Image (cartoon, rainbow, N blue to C red):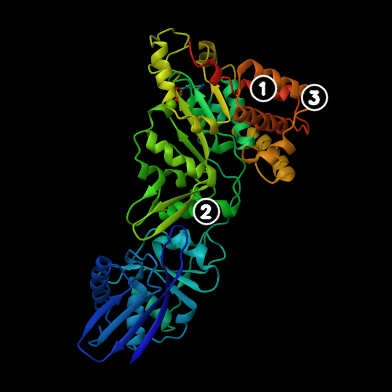
Amino acid sequence: MKMATVFSRAMDGLLAPLVRVEVHLSNGLPKLSIVGLPEAAVRESKDRVRSAIINAGFEFPTRRITVNLSPADLPKHGGRFDLPIAVGILVASEQLPDSGLADLELFGELSLDGTLRGFRGALPLALAAGDARALVLPLRVSQEAALVRSANVLAARHILEVAAHLAGKKALTRAVAPDFLSGRRCRKLDLADVLGQQVPKRALEIAAAGAHGLLLSGPPGTGKSMLASRLPGILPPMSEQEALEVSAIASLAGRGVTPDDFGVRPFRSPHHTASTAAMAGGGSVPKPGEISLAHNGVLFLDELPEFGRAVLEVLREPIESGEVRIARAAHQATFPARFQLVAAMNPCPCGYLGDRCGRCHCTPEQVQRYRHRVSGPLLDRLDIQIQVARPPRSVVLDDVEAGEQSEAVARRVVAAREHQLARQGTANALLDNAGLREWCRPDKKGEAMVSRAVARFGFSMRGTHKILKVARSIADLAGSTRVTSQHIAEAVSYRRLDTSRTH
Ligand SMILES: Nc1ncnc2c1ncn2[C@@H]1O[C@H](COP(=O)(O)OP(=O)(O)O)[C@@H](O)[C@H]1O
Ligand SMILES: [Mg+2]
């Protein structure tokens, strides 16, 4: 009996566990059977493998061929196992030598003529594989896999190129990705484009500094979406590891990863009609959803009260844990989902409550009902809550305040974040209660101000904690080791939406 073993990998959330593809040839009625793949996948793969082998000018063995993919209990789908199966058959039938095979991992769906097709999830493979073996990948997805610099990625267009490599005739070329550029951002979206709106811009900067959730409330057309979309551009740059996580998720979602957007923090803005599956991820071969695509970046929920309860509910667990679990019939996939939440809403159903133009005719009951659509726990996560008012006409027309560019703001944010990491190892918004007590305690005057604010506005314990964390971020931006009454006063002003809910 002839036999060959080829290495490949399965897909399990962001993980890519090793799979051994074993091919046995034995005497008996000619038949190809594949064990360890789902039924439908087996049928399609058989046809592709057979015709690719024949069309590439090889012989399809007229023997009994048994292919076993192990371990059996891993989720294995898609065509990525075509290439290892085909090469296994060619090696077992001695049409190709097996030298060097143990140092390779093979991936790729075959088209009927032997051309290799891409598939989603190539980057996670490279993350998982490390430098133990070289990865042979279809040319189209080899570039994204090569972003993982520790990986040795070989690009192939056709099964014949893989055959030539194994036969020692012509080595496959190594895919090389460009250097990682730290601190890239979307230059098209600069904070300087937002005219006026000094208070919202300041709030955005504080949110960036401490990784705080942010709620923007105001009439339509006041620049809420504009502001939110500029948050990624003022956040601290991602590390290479963070950038790889982001691109790995994009790769799994089948979005394709180009070196151009490698290292740019994501900004996701799902529509309020998005389903829970679109939001959390799902599908028979689980794909990451919006909250995972926003990993290490910003999730923007525009028109927050319009989102369905069930959709907002799926955010709760990931907000705590930084990951989302998608339960499948037989298996559970986990995707990372640590995002910074920004939400926008109108102040009332018509949108014009409190606007200068005085168009609003909503009754107080309508306003109440509208605002209560957003669940308390979610609002709780939004440390900073501000009103965005329509700027006076002169600001828009005269362009009086061509504000700061994102780059300048980002420098302050980076400095403030560095203070936090050096002091407590985490961003202020993520401090637990012990950390809060240790690092956010204000000075005497500050404490007195906290007490006064609690007495006056009736802040809950949780609300008070938010104020202390935000005040800590304000102090960090000012380079102050102490949290003073001035910092508290500003932080309190970002919690006033709650207390000014009615007319
Ligand atoms: N402060 C501002 N500076 C410059 N342009 C603005 C500002 N506010 C609104 N705009 C203009 O109005 C449009 C709508 O703004 P948008 O951010 O979508 O408002 P909102 O989300 O509050 O409804 C923007 O595309 C922009 O052209
Ligand atoms: Mg908007």
**Pointer 1 residue Cβ closer than 8 Å to ligand 1:** no
Residue annotated with mark 3: 444
The residue that appears at 34% across and 76% down in the rendered structure is 85
* Nearest to N terminus: mark 1 or mark 2: 2
Q: Secondary structure at mark 2?
A: helix
Q: Would you identify the image quadrant in which residue 450 lies?
A: top right
Q: Secondary structure at mark 1?
A: helix
**Pointer 3 residue Cβ closer than 8 Å to ligand 1:** no
Q: Amino acid at mark 3?
A: Lys
Residue annotated with mark 2: 245
Q: Nearer the viewer, mark 3 or mark 2?
A: 3
Q: Nearer the viewer, residue 304 or 404?
A: 304
- The answer to whether mark 1 and mark 2 are in CB contact below 8 A is no
State whether residue 203 is above or below residue 285.
above
- Tell me residue 107's x, y (percent): 39, 69
Looking at the figure, which quarter contains the N terminus? bottom left
Q: Nearer the viewer, mark 1 or mark 2?
A: 1
How many other residues sit within 10 Å of disc 3, few (<14), some (14-19) or many (≥20)?
A: few
- The answer to whether mark 3 and mark 2 are in CB contact below 8 A is no
Residue annotated with mark 1: 490
Q: Is residue 349 left or right of residue 387?
A: left
Figure label count: 3
* Nearest to N terminus: mark 1 or mark 3: 3
Q: Nearer the viewer, residue 151 or 452?
A: 452
Compute the Cα span from label 3 to label 2: 43 Å
Q: Is residue 427 left or right of residue 273?
A: right
Compute the Cα span from label 1 to label 2: 35 Å
Q: Amino acid at mark 2?
A: Glu
